[in-house]
């Protein structure tokens, strides 16, 4: 039988091993993130980068009445394309993000969402990175009314 002190130790070890420090979170992240003045005016400022279940860092715009827009940083190297269960490139439509046409696919678990395939963006200082955008607000779920983004 496991005693309480041993259980507490195990929980601490698991927590310490899986919770990155603020320094770890900041390492390798872009210095600038795409932003949406349109969302900022209606939903408020984006939340600081936080770790998604997928392990990526993302900033999030949270709609007060439900839904969000997450901008995930995929890294400096091209990430793998998202495919369907039968190996086809996931593409349920296309939308325009920062002047680029990008495929999106239906995603989300408990809440419906659409997520773009990763696209490469270059910030004003010339740094490049790969980003994906996830939309879960009802007005975005059909690939319509997508807000504009800029640096």
Image (tube, rainbow, N blue to C red):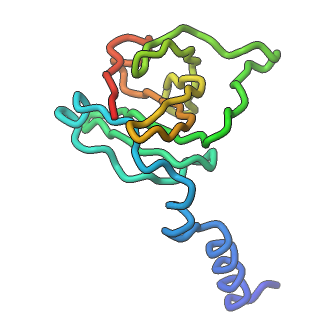
Residue occupying the point 18% across, 32% down: 42
Residue farthest along the left direction in this orientation: 41
Q: Is residue 95 shown above or below 124?
A: above
Where is residue 44 shown, x and y percent of the image?
Answer: 22, 41
Out of 11 and 124, give the one closest to the viewer.
124
Where is residue 143 shown, x and y percent of the image?
Answer: 43, 12
Out of 45 and 78, give the one closest to the viewer.
78
In this image, 85 relative to 25: left or right? right
Q: Is residue 101 shown above or below 65?
A: above
In this image, 151 relative to 126: left or right? left
Q: Tell how many labels.
A: 0
Where is residue 59 shown, x and y percent of the image?
Answer: 42, 45
Residue 54 location, quadrant: top right
Residue 61 location, quadrant: top left
Residue occupying the point 53% across, 25% down: 115
Residue occupying the point 35% across, 18% down: 146
Q: Is residue 126 shown above or below 17?
A: above
Image quarter where the C terminus lies is top left
Residue occupying the point 72% across, 15% down: 89
Where is residue 71 shown, x and y percent of the image?
Answer: 45, 37
Image quarter where the N terminus lies is bottom right
Residue farthest along the top direction in this orientation: 93
């Amino acid at each position: 039988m496991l005693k309480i002190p041993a259980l507490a130790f195990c929980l601490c070890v698991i927590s310490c091993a899986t919770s990155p420090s603020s320094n770890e979170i900041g390492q390798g992240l872009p210095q600038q993130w795409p932003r949406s003045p349109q969302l900022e005016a209606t939903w408020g400022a984006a939340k600081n980068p936080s770790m998604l279940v997928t392990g990526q860092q993302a900033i999030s715009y949270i709609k007060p009445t439900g839904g969000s827009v997450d901008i995930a940083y995929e890294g400096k190297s091209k990430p793998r394309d998202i495919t369907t269960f039968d190996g086809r490139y996931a593409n349920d439509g296309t939308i325009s993000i920062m002047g680029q046409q990008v495929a999106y696919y239906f995603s989300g678990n408990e809440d419906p969402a659409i997520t773009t395939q990763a696209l490469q963006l270059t910030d004003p200082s010339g740094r490049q990175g790969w980003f994906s955008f996830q939309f879960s607000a009802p007005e975005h779920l059909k690939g319509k009314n997508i807000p504009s983004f800029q640096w």
